[in-house]
Image: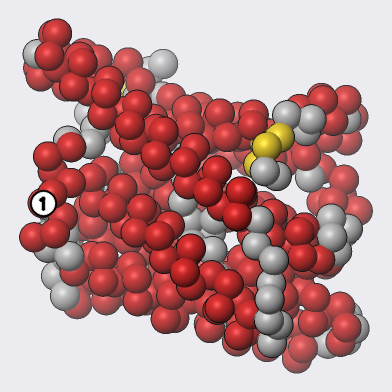
Amino acid sequence: MTEDKSTGISFFEKNLTIWVILCMAAGILIGKYLPAIPDFLSRFEYAQVSIPIAVLIWLMIYPMMMKVDFTSLRNVAKDPSGLYVTWVVNWLIKPFTMFGIAAFFFYVVFREFIPEELAQQYLAGAVILGAAPCTAMVFVWSHLTKGNPAYTVVQVASNDLIILIAFVPIVGFLLGVSGIPIPWDTLFFSVVIFVVIPLGAGIFTRQTVIRKKGFDYFQNKFIPIFNEFTIVGLLLTLVLIFSFQGDVILNSPLHILMIAVPLILQTFLIFFIAYFISRKIKLCHNIAAPGGLIGASNFFELAVAVAITVFGAQSPVVLVTIVGVLVEVPVMLALVKFANRTGHWFPRVA
C-alpha cells in the first residue's frame, strides 16, 4: 500500500472519507441483494457481540497496542489531568446532555412526525447510547490523531471500570426505571476482547520483537508492516455493520434522519466540551484529541445489547442505538480532521 512520503499519510488515510462512504454503500447493497452473507455471519455471536466484527475491531486496534510501551503506562499517573477530563465529560456531562438534546428534538422539534409514545422509546435508546462511552473504536480515532497510545489505553480502561458501577444507575435515573437488567456477559466479554486481549498481545509482540531484533528494527521495520491494518479493519467493519443493518436503513429513512440529528449534535457538543477544557488546562495534543474523541464516540456493542435485552430486538429503542452506529464513523472522521488541523493549539508531545 502506497504512502505519501512527504506527509507520512497513506493512500487509505488520505482518502478515508471516500473509502468510508463506499464501504457503507457496499454494506447496504450486500444486505439488500446478498442477504445470505450477513445471515450466515450473524450466526457467529457470543454474548450478543458479533465475532466477525470483534475480530475486525481487534485487527484495528492490535497495531496501536504494539506501540504501547508498558513502562510508559506508569507515567500516566504523573499527569492525570487528561483522565479527569475524560471522567468528568463522560459521566457528569455526556449522559445528561444526551437526554436534554434528544428530548428536545423528539418531543418538540419533531413532534409532528413522532408520536409521544414513540418519542419516549427513541429517548430511551438515546440515553442508553449516551451512557456508554467508547471502548474499541476510539483506538482508531487515537491512531488517526497520533494520540499517545499508553494514555489512550488508560483513558479507555478506566472508563470501562466506571461503566461497571455507573452505567445502570445513570440509565435508570434518566429513564425513571429501576432494576434494569444488564447483560454482564456482553459487558465483560467486550472489555476483554476489545482491551485486555489486544493490549496483552501487543505488549507481548513488542517485547518479543525488541528482545530478538532490537528496538530500531521494531520501530522502523516491524511496525510499518502493520500501518494499514487499522484502516483496513475499520473499512471491513463498516461493510459488515451496514450489511447487517441494510434493511433497517432502507425501510426507515425519514426516522433514521430524525434520530440522527440529536445524536450528531450531541457528538459534536461533547467533543468540543472535552477538547476546549483540555486546551484550557494546556494538555498536550496527543492526550487532548483522544480524550475528546472518547467522549464523542459510543460503546455501541453494549448499547445495542442492552437495548435488545431490555426492550426486545424489534423495539424502536434498538433502532436508535443502531443509528448511533451508522452516524458515528462519518462524524468522528470530521472531528479527527478538525483535531488534526488544530494541533497547534496545544503543546505537541506527552
Image coordinates for residue 305, horizontal then vertical, percent: 69, 54
Name the side, left or right, on which 133 lies relative to 100.
left
Kindly identify the residue that appears in the image at 79 percent across and 82 percent down: 120
Name the one closer to the observer, 198 or 34.
198
145 in relation to 128, above or below? above
Q: Quadrant of the N terminus?
A: top left
Tell me: residue 58, above or below residue 135. above
340 or 161, nearer to the observer: 161
Q: Quadrant of residue 50?
A: top right
Indicate the secondary structure of the residue bearing disc 1: helix
Q: Nearer the viewer, residue 306 or 122?
A: 306
Give the colouring mode of the picture: secondary structure
Q: Quadrant of residue 294?
A: bottom left
Residue in view at x 40 percent, y 60 percent: 161
Horizontal side of residue 309 vs 267, given as left or right = right
Type of the residue with mark 1? Asn
| Left or right of residue 260, residue 347 in this image | left
Where residue 166 sits in the image (x, y, percent)? 48, 72
Please give the name of the residue rendered at 64% of the width and 29% of the height, measured from the top-left corner. 52
Could you tell me if residue 231 is visible in this image?
no
Q: Position of residue 188 (x, y in %)?
A: 53, 48
Is residue 199 in sight in this rendering?
A: yes
The residue singled out by tag 1 in the image is: 75
Expressed as whole percent of the image width and height from the top left, the position of residue 245 reads 79, 45
Residue extending furthest bottom?
108
Residue at 61% in and 49% down: 186
Q: Quadrant of residue 309?
A: bottom right
Indicate left or right for 217 with 21 as reference. left
Q: Nearer the viewer, residue 58 or 348?
A: 58
Q: Residues within 10 Å of mark 1 (few under 14, many from 20)?
A: few
Instruction: Report the number of numbered marks.
Output: 1
